[in-house]
Image: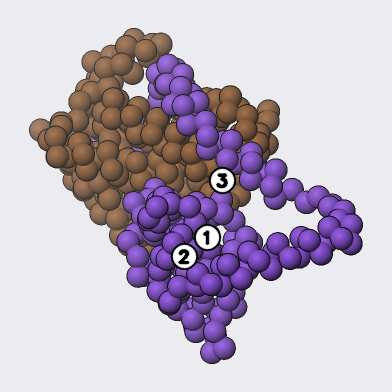
Amino acid sequence: VTSDAEVVRRVRGGDTAAFAVLVARYRDRLGRYAMHMLGDRGDAEEALQDAFVRAYRSIARCRDDAEFGPWLFGILVNRCRTAGRRAARRQRMFVRDEVSLERASAPETADQAEWDDTVHWAMARIAPPLREAFLLKHVEDLEYDEMSRLTGAGVSALKMRVKRAREQLRALLTEVERV
Amino acid sequence: VFDRDEDVLERVIAHLRLPVEMDPTLDAAVMERVSAAGPTSRLAAAWEWFRRPREISVSPLGGLALAAVLAGVALWLVGRHPSAGSPSDTSNTIQFVVVAPGAGSVSLVGDFNNWDGTVTPMHATRSGTLWSVTVPLSPGRYRYAFLVNGSRWLADPAAPRAPDDFDAPSSVVTVGG
């Protein structure tokens, strides 16, 4: 497998087509974050496309070729913030990811579909900065200093956001279970 | 019903970690937009070519002629030297100034030098407080920042901030025609 650094060098050298390797490599991983952050497949795909195109245009600014992945992720985090603000203005509600359900290889049970709805409903109820911190910490498995570099927020603020996200999610979901 | 509250969160996290499959046609859409942005990669290629070290042989007579041309260019630039500003614009020669007391080195990085910290070092005043450099720029809009001690990125406090997607802060200067 060609390393990111090697592909980045080829792209920098003028080999535009080589960028497709990076798109295929990071599409699903980054797509998952965008989906959970924005709660809407269309918005997520738009943010992801924008992130890739911006990364390409600015690839000369990627200071360490081997760190292309984290650098690209940082761009996506910012695109999601912008897209989230736009979506909030549209008053868009979180909806179940029907496309993903259709593509799932195993038929989904009613319970699984309900749980999927519930998780997305709860994620949509917590404030975007809390959702962002929760996803970076618990889903993307980042360390707090990495999160700090990506978001520009301090480590202690991020710890507080994760804590509050956990508390709010727990409260929301426990409430659902009791209904 | 969950046995413990923690189980709820563990179930949420496990669910959110499931792989998500994005539309594969997204790749083609991205590559179409990337291909349309071709000049950026050509610029990067040109820059790679330009910065590649190479040996140049110049005859003694050619050396004298080259020195004369360089001296002429330097005099022309000095003649257009603007007053202090941050940045100030006089006929496309821009002086960038930043206050960075105690810095060991400061360089100017931006769209015009491919964000390379080695290309445009700034020079300190005798007190080491004020750093400046003058660069010729074609008319256009440029993003730039100051690189302090080779690692700390600083936006120009005296200029508009660039709307940016990166962790490094930067500013904007517009050079008139």
Rounded to the nearest whole Å, what is the CA distance between mark 3 and mark 1?
Answer: 21 Å
Q: Residue at x 59, y 64 (%)?
A: B120
Q: Residue at x 42, y 66 (%)?
A: B90
Q: Nearer the viewer, residue A33 or B50?
A: B50
Mark 3 neighbour class, 10 Å CA radius: few under 14, some 14 to 19, many 20 or more: many
Q: Nearer the viewer, mark 3 or mark 2?
A: 2
Q: What amino acid type is highlighted by mark number 2? A: Ile
Discs 2, 1: same chain: yes
CA–CA distance between discs 2 and 1? 6 Å
Disc 1 residue type (three-letter): Pro
Q: Which image quarter is the N terminus of chain B in?
A: top left
Colour scheme shown: by chain
Residue position marked by numbered label 2 in the rendering? B94
Q: Is residue A147 left or right of residue A40?
A: right
**Residue B82: image x %, image y %?**
45, 73
Query: Are there few (<14), some (14-19), or many (20+) residues within 10 Å of tag 2?
Result: many
Quadrant of residue B175 within the rendered picture: bottom left
Instruction: Pinpoint residue B80: horizontal percent, then vertical percent.
Output: 50, 69
Q: Chain of mark 1?
A: B
Which residue is labeled 3 in the image? A60
Q: Is residue A165 above or below residue B158?
A: above
- Can you tell which quarter of the image residue A65 is in? top right
- Colour chain B is painted in: purple
Q: Which residue is mark 1?
A: B136
**Chain A on-screen colour:** brown
